[in-house]
Amino acid sequence: MRFLNAAAIAQALPFDALIAALRERFALGCEVPARQILPIATPGGEVLTTMLMPAWVVGGLYGVKVINMTPANAARGLPGLHATYLLQDAVTGVPLCVMDGDELTLRRTAAASALAASYLARADARHLLVVGAGRVAAYVPQAYGAVRDLQQVSVWARRADEAQALAKLWQAQDFHAQAVTDLPAAVQAADMVSCATLATAPLVQGAWLQPGAHLDLIGSFTPAMREADDACFAGASVFVDTPEALKKSGDLLGPLASGVITAQDVRADLAALCRGQHPGRAHAQERTVFKSVGTALEDLAAAMLVQTAFAADL
């Protein structure tokens, strides 16, 4: 059994190949049981929350991602989240590989948003605004650059220094990138807006979005989180990664509760888009919204691509 660190995972998951792998897996499907959440008590009275995300292809490969979340780690100078991925043979149960789950998750999350944008953003979309400066946000331009010809990348974050640092990183990756401080003006100027934050109150307002814009909401993976106000959904074509988003995301639960949208207003999920059951964007002036909460299918698709890259060693 091989152990693959973050550098090896990054090498095996270039975004063009990863997006293609996600497209194929969403089209073909796999077995994805409900994720399991385990609260684990610690001697200090804190709670370590462990989430198990399994998925498998019958007769093929079987993977489980273990995510440990410990908010108290901030006081220890440690990351609050650690993820590990175990890939196994789905027939024999033989363990094949242990992977850095953080790198795998970051890359598949950004790639899933780019996959959605390949169907939902205008074909001539060139200007991407990233809202947030965290670990997922850092990968978004590389992923979007695999599906659209980016001419300009802007970034806004609550802390201007973090936005500046991210813009410099992207400039080193040959993007025409800049940090911005005026969020309403930045949203109005962008063709695509991708939010990757831990916000609990809306950051983006629908009144700021231009006709034909595409809004990508990566954060808000719990009912208490919001990145967009209700107006972002009014009159927009709404898409999700999986139907689970309708039960988990505050960004959807809010407009559903207020009657701005209904569950029937969601046009399609990623599986339907990838299978050609829905065409995606209908016209240039259509405003689209994609809400994701993540799925173990994406983890398995990424891990299978890693397995292919290192097949000779596994």
Image: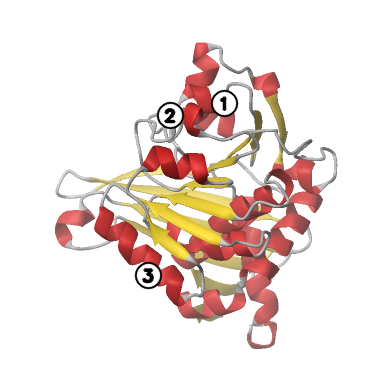
Residue positioned most to the top:
259
Report the residue at 53% width, 46% height from top. Answer: 190
The reply to whether the C-beta atoms of the residues labelled 3 and 1 are less than 8 Å apart is no
Depth check, mark 1 against mark 2: the one in front is: 1
Q: Secondary structure at mark 3?
A: helix
Q: Quadrant of the N terminus?
A: bottom right
Residue 180, image x and y in percent? 36, 52
Q: CA distance from mark 3 to mark 2?
A: 34 Å
Label count reads 3
Q: CA distance from mark 1 to mark 2?
A: 17 Å
Which mark identifies residue 233?
1
Label 3 vs 1, first from the N-terminus: 3
Colour convention: secondary structure
Name the amino acid, label 3: Lys
Label 1 vs 2, first from the N-terminus: 2
The reply to whether the C-beta atoms of the residues labelled 3 and 2 are less than 8 Å apart is no
Q: Residues within 10 Å of mark 1 (few under 14, many from 20)?
A: many
Q: Secondary structure at mark 2?
A: loop
Q: Is residue 193 left or right of residue 305?
A: left
Q: Secondary structure at mark 1?
A: loop
**Above-or-below relation of 239 to 165:** above
Name the amino acid, label 2: Pro
Looking at this view, is 115 or 275 the one in front?
115
Q: Residues within 10 Å of mark 2 (few under 14, many from 20)?
A: some
Residue located beneath label 2 in the image: 223
Residue located beneath label 3 in the image: 168
Name the amino acid, label 1: Phe
**Above-or-below relation of 106 to 205:** below
